[in-house]
Image (cartoon, rainbow, N blue to C red):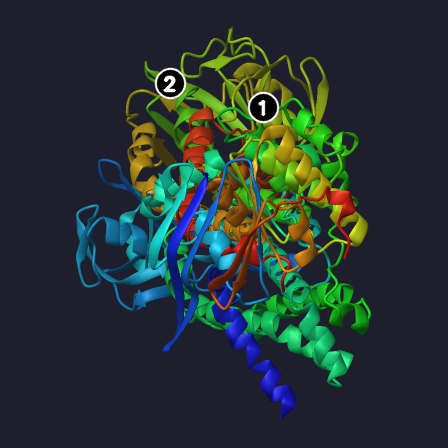
Amino acid sequence: MLKMTINRRIRRILSENRSQYIGSFILIVLSSFLFSFMGQFACNFKRLADNFRINNIQEDASFVTSVSLTSLTELESMADAVIEEGLKFDYQLADGLTLRIFSMNEKINLPGIVEGRNVMADGEILLNPVFAESNGFGIGDEIKIHGKSYTITGYLALPNYMYLLQSEVDMMPRPGFGIAVVSRKDFAGFGIGSPFYSVKFNHSPEPLRVRSARLRELIVEKGVEIAEWTNADDNKRINIVDAEVEIISMVSKAVPTAILLLAVIIVSRIVSRLIKRDSTIIGTLYALGYRKREIYFHYLRLPLALAITGSIAGALPGLLPVRAMVSFIFDAFNIPLTEIETDAGRMAASLIIPVLIIVLSSYIVIRSRLRRSPADLLRGRKEKTGINFLERALNLEKVGFTVKFQIREQLRSLSRVTFLLLGIAVATVMMQWGFSLKKSTDFLLTGGVSGIYEFGYEYKFDRLRADPLPYGAEPFSAALFVPPGAEKKDLYVMGVLPASGMLTLTGKSGALLSTDMVIATIPAAKMLNTAEGEPIRVIRKIDGREFTIRVDEIADTYAGNFIFMPVDEYNKMFDMPEGSYNGAFSNVLLDLPADVSHSMVTMEEKMAGVEELLGPTKSMIGFVVFMAAIIGMIIVYLVSSMIVDENTITISLMKIFGYRRKEVSNLVLNSSTMVVVLGYLLGIPLTMSAIGSMIQSLEDSVGLIVPPARISLPYILIGFLVIMLAYEVSKRLSKRKVNAIPMSEALKAGME
Amino acid sequence: MIIDVSELRKSYRTGNVVTEVLKGVGLRLDEGEIGVILGPSGSGKSTLMNLIGGIDRCDSGKITVDGIEVTRLTDEELTLYRRERLGFVFQFYNLIPNLTVGENIEVVSNISTSPLKTDEVLDAVDMLDKRNRFPQELSGGEQQRTSLARAIVKNPGLLLCDEPTGALDYDSSLSILKLMQGINVRFRTTILMITHNSAIAGLAHRVFRLRSGEITEELVNKSILPAEEIIW
């Protein structure tokens, strides 16, 4: 009964110093919320993507040949694989709207129905949902293709187009690009379309890449030339999903952990101060016959109550926005959202981890504080508050009193100053992360590409051509290569006209580079780890042949992984027919014969979509900046509250000495200014390193090399203003506490 | 005369219970004098000191200090009054733990219009060699000397001392009293001290006995003792 009574104190203690407990409670809630929300989001994203790959039989590889394969069954049995021929063509629905239409597959890359139903009869069509919705096509509507009407029966997703890139060299989907599937019979009615093959290997422990290489050899042995070969692992339409899952997983652990760390520091400090204040009470409890473990448990109740209520209040609501977030991300990744599931393990972790860590750290604090003997505690003898090495080492003779006082105030408690420094740094990292995301997106969509390409249309032909092109168009030849031993990273080697008018490449000095030499972009040079004048070895993906190229210059651009060389040299080096090409840059629409299978993208399409694509990014950045400001405000408020609480006597004394309220507030509360500024400055390199890890992850998983993290001065200033605003708001809140301290506090000091 | 208190009343309310702490107190102290208020615990000594020091407000009555009617001052005027005219010495020293001895003095000189030099006051209390020590590195007597230096750095007209020797041993107490007497002579600072130790009355010009909120006796000391001769 006695134990029950003493534990009633906890609620009273909580209500005594509400602001600090509310602040730490909010941090725990936030951490658990993000653990739960982002974790469940990452789990569902991965699960839905994996299920889609398995259930709808995602290809292991796809290829295009110069002539149709006649003996598929024989090839299937030799390669122990299922091979299915598909057909596709790009249809210009309107200006800026391109629909890639596929024939219905039966074995591999089966359409997943996102909404509505599959095509069952002739004259029916499936569209991807984002394209349909953004262009006003509903289920049941008609769409005209080559003069014939098709009824939209549903929205689809294709396992080999989870990330809807129109071209493999694109980095982001284009808003005017969509995919559609019609029945084979309907497709035959179009009378056009280029064949391609999808491969699914039967189960075997042998690596897919080896099996893939063997199948290539089998095809070549049959005298068939392979025009294009893409393994699923190298296909950005597929593997960007893995990169995204990896990044979300990384963020879903790092951000809540950082916030939890802040919560741990603050709760530990609260517990430590409580025990220090309660030393006489603890001594009395010992004298009354309480056991050590009962006292431990009594003081553990406070962090336990905060951690349990905080983690429940955070983790459970964290489940609510998971569906909305998955649905939001599936606007960018075309994957059917069948069912949201709650991952029990992750949920348990979201509930238990914050409780475990907070209780454990509090236990350590309690143990270190209760080392004093009961007699010592009972006498209420104060623990010696040691002067730390920094306080002792500082010589502040020459600085003014205000600065001296503020420096001393901050150095009084190293754990408090660490908490403030880390807290502001975490808020800064979050905010600058958001800003740099916007900057990178802007760069990838605009600056990176528009700076070097001077053409309106890019054509890619499914077969080699040698016919002359009209004025305003330039031929190019391109093939995918990989560096030896790094098969996930690929780059394009492109043969272009010497002195091409369609490409503007500049060197590091800013001087224009002529395309009559071998020029690598920065990402390609980095990937190959090469410098000007060095020979590099590359392996052609399509046939695994190795070549050596000597790069003459490195162009100062991050627009993709490219090595440009004169097209004649290209054809000679890679054994291509003289005068041949497989693509064209053009400023005019080409009038191509109907049997020339090709795909075409326009630069306008890309640019027009920038604003639309940036919409969700902007709102996400707004949310991140808002969260960062809130975290910053909570941290500064908690620290200010602690400073006020720890300085009650000093504040009271200053009032007695004749300090005005404003003077006291400025002296005490402004002492954090320099730490806030330092925390902000510390946050900048931390942001660079966090973004650096993300970029590395992108490079490792999909071979995407993006510009090094750069934080621009305007964003540094904006971030600084946001943090300082949060600081001012929390100071204003704390000012009331300073004003409320009576002068009698100092008069009572030492009497208890 | 520097202090003139008349008909001072003060009561505190706790729930429905009203406790009358001061019941029409009156006292006078001239410039340059040392006054000692003697009384047991609960007699109202500290309340009287707080009212004269402008830390608390009375219910009725009048306090005039150096011609200023303290009982009529606004909050801002009270702040200026404490800032410019008063020095305080507390029983438990109330030094700021994370400031050095020198910096503790600066807390007051920082807001004074014409403060004395820090080193000069530290020298006066014989603490110059401990200028860069932190309070916890000092004995009780040394802490009280620092407190005294802090109180006089602004060269106040009136020094209010609340049991200045209450937490000290005999020798340290004597040395503090000696210092106070020296300050009184050197700077002509009027000192009003409250204590329950009647021996200290030996060094005062005037002694007031306070019991249950009333002045029961007022003595003018004809034979003031030097501090070192006080025994208890």
Q: Residue A402: x, y in percent?
A: 55, 31
Using residue A223 as the reference point, say whether residue B58 is left or right of it: left
Along the line of sight, the residue nearer the viewer: A62 or A686: A686
Residue A165, how many percent across, how many down?
42, 43
Name the mark on residue A15: none
Query: How many labels sit on residues?
Result: 2
Q: Residue at x 39, y 66 (%)?
A: B11
> What separation in Å lies between label 1 and label 2 (alpha carbons)?
19 Å
- In the rendered image of this protein, does residue A479 appear above or below residue A451? below
Furthest residue to the top?
Answer: A511
Residue sitting at 33 percent across and 55 percent down?
A: A128
Give the residue drawn at x 71%, y 30%.
Answer: B124
For the residue pair B55 and A614, the one nearer the viewer reads as B55
**Looking at the image, residue B130 lies above or below residue A558:** below
Vertical order, A476 against A651 (above or below): above
Mark 1 chain = A
- Where is residue A657? Give x, y as percent: 51, 41
Q: Vertically, is A486 above or below A206?
A: above
Inspect this view and state whether residue B120 appears.
Answer: yes
Q: Disc number at residue A454? A: 2
Amino acid type at mark 1: Ile
| Badge 1 and badge 2 both on one subunit | yes
| Residue behind mark 1 | A522
Q: Secondary structure at mark 2?
A: loop
Instruction: Name the element at disc 1.
Output: helix
Q: Is residue A681 visible?
A: no
Comparing labels 1 and 2, the label whose residue is closer to the camera: 1
Label whose residue precedes the other's in the sequence (1 or 2): 2
